């Protein structure tokens, strides 16, 4: 599901423009500490670059009941049981890595080695050793559609995927799915390609945790390959957690080398490299709640239409993240009381963009928008926006603006209602 992005490029009688300096005059004095806000680097969230989850170090007996744990390492063809770091499964090629996880996601039977046969597994803890793991990601898998090949992998309900630290473990996309059929179910343009590293295997896949690793969507290499193969545009993304219910936790993750080139051809195919969402019909955002996205850094975006971190038809807390150089930093649609706070967006077109459908109770607090190419915030459009709050200190280049689409706003903006007294 995508939403049409409305670009407010001209000041008109139906819009309100508020300069950065004006925003600062209504902030509490405590928020004006220059030492805390004088540079992007001073405000970037701190990643523990060598963190290892306790779920990968504690005894198996201490894991929550019903949990399966598997260790995967780069072992050059030596495959173990996966029950201990010293006997890790071998993930030294994309085929091996994906096969291990696909077996847990879909179930598999190995007639030659019954010990490696596994049922479809929920509540799986995946512990990844150091190094660069190659993967095809979700490749050609689509939810509610039979998987047409034995390639790639998806993530099941209750899975916890942990690296050995963002400086130690990298999951790198090794291939894209080429779009060749003009009648493809996603209606994507032909001669394009897509790839997502982590995505769910069903709408029941709630309670997922991804942490302590770098996700490399590998645009430079895959773009060179695409040019050789005649593909004109690539959408390469990191995490798509689609589920009817929430409980997701994305933390201590570094994302690099994504792209949204197909969105550049047609805005309907804009990308959301880190995305928590629900497509459940007739549902409310509160039904997909308890989600957290924190300590995620995103850089090396390679162009196209994109919102780096997005929430749709869900409720989440999005905190202490840093987005650098993307088209849009943060946003979403059909949101309940989503709380965006203490985030940084540097060198984006917009720091925040919320422009579609009905959104109620969104709070945007204590964020920094540094050097936006166009605007700090773009809020409003084809929908209704109620009980919004944009509060506390934020920073942007002089002369940049906040654009609010008129008539669809209610209640609180910057601790007071917008002034709609100007002529229609």
Image: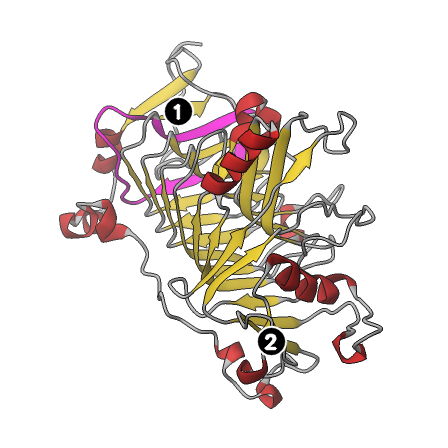
Q: Is residue 182 left or right of residue 176?
A: right
Q: Is residue 37 left or right of residue 259?
A: left
Report which quarter residue 358 is drawn in.
top right
How many residues crowd around disc 2 within 10 Å: few (fewer than 14), some, or many (20 or more)? few
Q: Which residue is mark 1?
A: 403
Q: Position of residue 73 (x, y in %)?
A: 54, 72
Label 1, label 2: how many angstroms apart (C-alpha)? 57 Å
Q: Residue visible at 78% across and 67% down?
A: 120
Instruction: Reply yes or no: does residue 423 show up in magenta.
Output: no
User: Label 2's element?
Assistant: loop
Instruction: Reply yes or no: does residue 378 show up in magenta.
Output: yes
Q: Which residue is mark 2?
A: 78
Q: Is residue 384 visible?
A: no
Q: Is residue 107 above or below residue 2?
A: below
For the C terminus, which image quadrant?
top left
Report which quarter residue 283 is drawn in.
top right
Q: Earlier in the sequence, mark 1 or mark 2?
A: 2
User: Label 1's element?
Assistant: strand
Q: Position of residue 230 (x, y in %)?
A: 60, 27
Q: Which residues are magenta?
A: 375-401
């Amino acid at each position: 599901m995508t939403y049409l992005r409305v670009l407010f490029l001209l000041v008109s009688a139906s819009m309100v423009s508020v300069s950065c300096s004006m925003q600062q005059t209504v902030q509490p004095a405590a928020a004006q500490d220059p030492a805390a806000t004088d540079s992007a680097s001073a405000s970037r969230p701190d990643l523990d670059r060598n963190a290892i989850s306790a779920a990968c170090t504690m005894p198996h007996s201490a894991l929550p009941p019903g949990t399966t744990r598997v260790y995967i390492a780069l072992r050059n063809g030596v495959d173990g049981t996966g029950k201990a770091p010293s006997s890790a499964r071998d993930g030294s090629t994309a085929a091996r890595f994906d096969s291990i996880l696909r077996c847990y996601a879909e179930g598999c039977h190995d007639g030659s080695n019954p010990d490696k046969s596994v049922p479809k597994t929920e509540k799986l803890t995946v512990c990844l050793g150091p190094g660069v793991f190659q993967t095809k990601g979700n490749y050609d898998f689509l939810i509610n559609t039979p998987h047409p090949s034995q390639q790639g992998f998806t993530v099941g309900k209750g899975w916890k995927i942990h690296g050995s630290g963002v400086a130690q473990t990298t999951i790198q996309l090794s291939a894209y799915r080429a779009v060749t059929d003009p009648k493809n179910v996603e209606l994507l343009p032909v001669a394009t390609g897509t790839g997502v590293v982590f995505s769910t295997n069903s709408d029941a896949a709630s309670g997922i945790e991804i942490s302590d690793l770098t996700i490399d969507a590998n645009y430079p290499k895959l773009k060179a390959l695409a040019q050789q193969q005649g593909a004109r545009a690539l959408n390469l993304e990191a995490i798509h957690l689609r589920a009817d219910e929430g409980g997701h936790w994305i933390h201590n993750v570094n994302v690099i080398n994504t792209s949204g080139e197909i969105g550049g051809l047609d805005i309907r195919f804009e990308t959301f490299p880190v995305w928590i969402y629900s497509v459940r019909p007739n549902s409310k955002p509160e039904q997909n709640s308890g989600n957290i996205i924190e300590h995620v850094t995103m850089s090396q975006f390679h162009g196209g239409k994109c919102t780096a971190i997005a929430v749709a038809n869900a409720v989440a807390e999005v905190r202490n993240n840093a987005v650098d150089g993307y088209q849009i930093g943060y946003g979403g649609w059909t949101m309940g009381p989503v709380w965006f706070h203490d985030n940084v967006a540097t060198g984006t077109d917009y720091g925040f963009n919320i422009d579609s459908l009905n959104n109620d109770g969104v709070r945007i607090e204590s964020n920094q928008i540094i050097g936006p190419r166009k605007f700090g915030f773009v809020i409003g459009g084809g929908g209704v926006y109620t009980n919004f709050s944009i509060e506390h200190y934020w920073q942007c280049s002089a002369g940049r603006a906040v654009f609010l689409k008129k008539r669809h706003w209610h209640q609180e903006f910057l601790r007071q209602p917008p002034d709609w007294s100007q002529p229609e």
